[in-house]
Amino acid sequence: MLLHTFAITPNNRKVVAFIKHFDLPVEIHQVNFAKKETSTDEFRALNPMGKVPVLVDGDFSLWESNAILSYLALKFPQTNSLPEDIRGRANVDRWLHWQSCHLMPLIGRFKTGDETDMAAINPLFDVLEVQLKDKDFIVGDLSIADFAIAAYLMTSLGNKFDYSGHPRLSEWRDLVSQLSGFVESQVRIPPKPAA
Ligand SMILES: N[C@@H](CCC(=O)N[C@@H](CS)C(=O)NCC(=O)O)C(=O)O
């Protein structure tokens, strides 16, 4: 199995962190954007969106990071990262969709500058704070939902939010950031050389 990725971004890092955390037999290939690798016909055949991450398993290629997380969790059930019962599974799906439909778009607005008030994240943090009230992880046990959501809160932007009003969220973020997969997938950007 092969993952095409660009590990610095949260949608990529969530998958790389999952693979590393569970030491899954997936080869990791960092795409070269400078060489327009994702614009080639060969890459577009894997993902017509021309984006990463993309997982290739034999003759099956899968794009969309949360779909990849679900696939890996099902392919490697020993990870115990996706409940088998219908409601447990739906619960994880709910948080994956919440990340895609609510967290990611708001983060996108911060990045484009359409949102400049850092406190605008608080309604979403309120939701996570309530969810984590009596649990170690988002759905209780560690699941792919933790990887999907936490990756967004560990970026340089994620580090700038004020977590002081959300103590459980803050504890969970610290806990997940210490998981081996997130430690190993940390990408340090070298400082720009002085002009
Ligand atoms: N919803 C997709 C987003 C994928 C995505 O936007 N990937 C970005 C990096 S995070 C990318 O490949 N951008 C390069 C491009 O758009 O050319 C997912 O979760 O996988």
Image (spheres, rainbow, N blue to C red):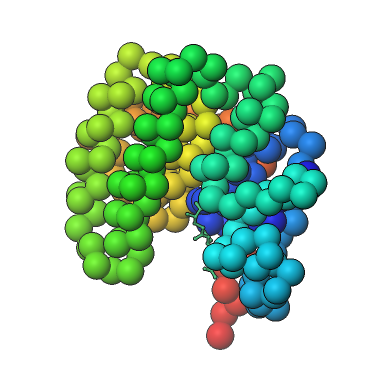
Count of residue discs = 0
Residue 1 placement (x, y as % from top left): 78, 44
Answer yes or no: is residue 145 visible: yes
Q: Is residue 141 left or right of residue 35?
A: left
Q: In which quarter of the image is residue 91?
A: top left
Q: In this orientation, which residue lies closer to the viewer: 91 or 60?
A: 60
Q: Is residue 89 left or right of residue 53?
A: left
Q: In this orientation, which residue lies closer to the viewer: 48 or 118?
A: 48
84 over 179 or under it: above or below = above
Q: In this orientation, which residue lies closer to the viewer: 195 or 70?
A: 70
Q: Quadrant of residue 46?
A: bottom right
Residue 184 placement (x, y as % from top left): 67, 42
Question: Which residue sits at x=60%, y=19%?
Answer: 80
Q: Residue furthest bottom?
A: 195
Question: Which residue sits at x=65%, y=35%?
Answer: 72
Q: In this view, does 99 lie to the left or right of 39?
A: left
Residue 40 placement (x, y as % from top left): 69, 75
74 over 10 or under it: above or below = above
Question: Which residue sits at x=65%, y=68%?
Answer: 44
